[in-house]
Amino acid sequence: MYIKCQDLTYSYFSNSPPIFQGIGFNISEPGFYALFGLSGVGKSTLARLLTKRSPVSSGVITGKIETDLKSILYAHDSERLPEWIPIKKHLYEVTPLQNHGLLNELIESYGLRDVMAKRFSSLSMGQKNRVNLIRYLLQNWDMLITDEVLANVDEPTRYTILYSIKRLFPNRILLYISHNAIEVVRFSKRIFILPQMPAGATHLFEMPGLNQYLQPPDEKQVQLSLYELLRTASCGVKMEDRRTI
Amino acid sequence: MKAFFSRLFQFSAIYTCFLSLLWLAKYGMGLSDYLIPSPVEFLNTIQEDGLDYVAYSLNTLSVAVLGHIISILLAGSISILGSLKSTIGTVTRVAAYNLQAYPIVAVSPIIFIFLGDGLASRLLIAAMICYFPLLLSLLGIFSQPVEDVEHFFVETGKIHHRLKLTIRLFENLKKLLTVLTGSATLAMVGTIVAEFLAATAGIGHAIKIALYQDNLARILLALLLIGICSSVYLAAIEILGEVVSRNLQKD
Amino acid sequence: MRIISLIFCIFCIIVSFSGCTSDEKTARPKVEVQPVVLRLKWLVNVSAAGEIWALKHHIFEANGLHVELKEGGLEHNAIKDLELGRAQFGVASADQVIRAVEKGADIVVLAQIFQKNPLKWAYDASKLHIQGPQDLKGLTVGITYGGNDEAVFRALMAKYGLSKEDIRLYAVRQDYTPFWNGEAQLWPVYSNVEGLVLAQKMQEHGKRLSFFDPDAFGVHLVANSLITSRRIYEAQPELVQNFTKALLQGWSQVIEPQNELEAAQAVHEFDNSLDIKLIRQQLAATRELVTTDTLPIGTIDKAAWKESEEIMLQQGLISKPVGIEGVLKDSLR
């Protein structure tokens, strides 16, 4: 189980400056990973490239993506469910039969039992995020990229969700894109950082996360990691031994 | 019901203003009853010809409604075809955009030659005149992805053509209703024009006769009834749209 | 100050010289002409031959008039134009005049251009033999609902005791398809205009066109007549006289057989959809409508006008008599 990128370069148009260039990373085991960066650096673009939904630049392409993963899904926070059927009906329709039991469990643990009969538009933002995430989690995926999918969920519920993902899907790869640096630091096994650079990011930094699961990590460690994460993301510090290959 | 009364009220207000201006001009400029009929003559005309003209208007309205339904079905079918990414879809789209430049009213005399002056020609002209705006709107709706809703199905490989169309149709329901209401007006106009040109029934035919007879009072009566019928029909479409929308979104 | 005076002088010189040309024609003193608009009953075709001739041969100008011809139609009505001041003279038929007078329009009939009504019903004489109204029984007759042909035909039916069971009336439309395919055996035409075009087409297909003329069976509805508003008639009698004189002079000359070719060429300039030969035939037919054996061109046939009023009263097209004699004026007699 692996996914590897080398020298990935992307521009929106052939004559526009690249969003990022020479990006590379390697994930070779299941786990909870995070992709972090300030707004507008190209996190979502990189994520979409991994699912091969967006075309790669028509300029010089030096990068390549290699993987043995059969199914890579990308979920984002703006998604909506079809409005003409109640949520419950939609979830049962899109969930494979063998996962219906898990569906019921997630509905309960994510606090969505009371909204199942409603239509998507009548939910709160947090409820919408959770419903959308559930339907992705219950698909047959090898890697799931979630792009701010829990942005509107309150912290305790978010932690519940992230714990449940770690518990239920230990053998899969989750790439978690979020602006919540504390969460990223706490829960990730490894953090990929796309830095903000004037002419687009030229490499992807990497640092270990605290991989929180049942026990919360030491707060001092959290603070230190947080500091390193934010400094790296804003690209104010040269990291000597933390560059990716 | 609110939509119904609102439309009727709007039309009545406009029509009353129009009549007031007309009579203001008549008495201000000292124009004879031949040029602009007096209020008394107008009321007499309503009394004498009112029932006949109501029958003509209802005749026209029924043809317009039927023509409108036909054009919706036709536009729906062609736009579904036009939404395909295949050659058929491309050709259909190109043909639709280019043919819309043809003024149907100009072609209508040919329609009358082949179909005569009965119901068929009126129906065809009414259907064709509102067909193209409907088609173009539907083509636009069906070819524009709704990324927020379609994304999940695309990611998970569950997307298919019928689902895509359903999503796009549902997401643009309000826009569709607006187009339906607008095209309903066109259907009425088209039917009246067809009747004026060559038919032997309907309010358009009555207007033609009134024009030959220089009877403006009858023309004013015809305009009143056309306005009422149009308002009723448009309100009916709005109410129907509201009911459908509400039922689809009912928890 | 000096410079301003100099500029002013130069300006005056330029202005004064701009009025001078070496063109001989413009050196002659200008004749004052009064601009006048004449709204016709229908298109500018052979039925307006007299007007066209008067225009082409400067007869209007010789009478101090600059005339603009405007074609008439369903939307352009001479009587409405007179009332709104958009035209000073117009051409209208008796049914239009009578309807307008009933509704209070103040107009005056100056001259009756057509002594006979060109409105007739065309039929295929190789298939039908119509000698009188009774021969119409069992046939389908085209009429323009609301038009003067409806009034004429219903008057004929009433006069000869023909009921709607005897004759099927068919609503006419702009094309002749129902007539061609035999759906309607009789079709209303203006015998001096489209009647001859139809005759030619029928001849090409081995058929023979003939006309059923209600006028021949005592149904007289007066056709094209010259009208003006009473306001102009009373305020500008000289204008009225000059115009009427010029127009009737135009008609007198245009129907002369020796002028036929030139007249056809003049009409062709306005209506080039037909060839000269056909226009000459139309002119010959028009001659029959405009002239009588004894009376001068433009004579108002009061009896025919009275009958026209009677027809409209019988048909319910007017609710009461309008006293049509009161609007008939023979300004040159």
Image (cartoon, coloured by chain):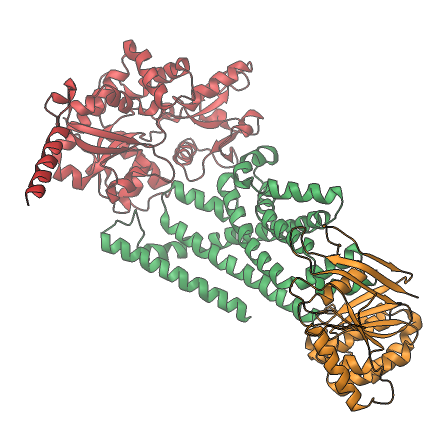
Q: Is residue B185 left or right of residue B75?
A: left
The tint of chain A in the picture is orange
Residue C287: image quadrant is top left
Q: Residue furthest front?
A: A240
Quarter occupied by the N terminus of chain B: bottom right
Which chain is rendered red in the image? C
Residue at 74% of width from left, 48% of height from top? B84
Q: Is residue A197 left or right of residue C179?
A: right
Question: Compared with residue A5, is residue B80 higher up or lower down, i.e. above or below?
Answer: above
Q: Is residue A178 left or right of residue C100?
A: right
> Residue C252 is drawn in which quadrant?
top left
Q: Looking at the image, is B18 positioned above or below residue C315?
A: below
Quadrant of image for the C terminus of chain B: bottom right
Give x and y (percent) for residue B115: 61, 36
Q: Residue at x 51, y 18 (%)?
A: C201
Picture coordinates of residue B215, whole percent (x, y):
37, 46
Residue C15, quarter of the rendered image: top left
Residue at image x 30%, y 47%?
B35
Position of residue C180 relative to residue B136, above or below, is above
**Residue nearer the viewer, C235 or A237:** A237
**Rendering coords of residue A70 (x, y %):** 90, 61
* Residue C269: image location, x then y, percent: 35, 20
Chain shown in green = B
| Closer to us: B168 or B199 | B168
Name the residue nearer the viewer: B226 or A20.
A20
Res. A182 visible in picture: no
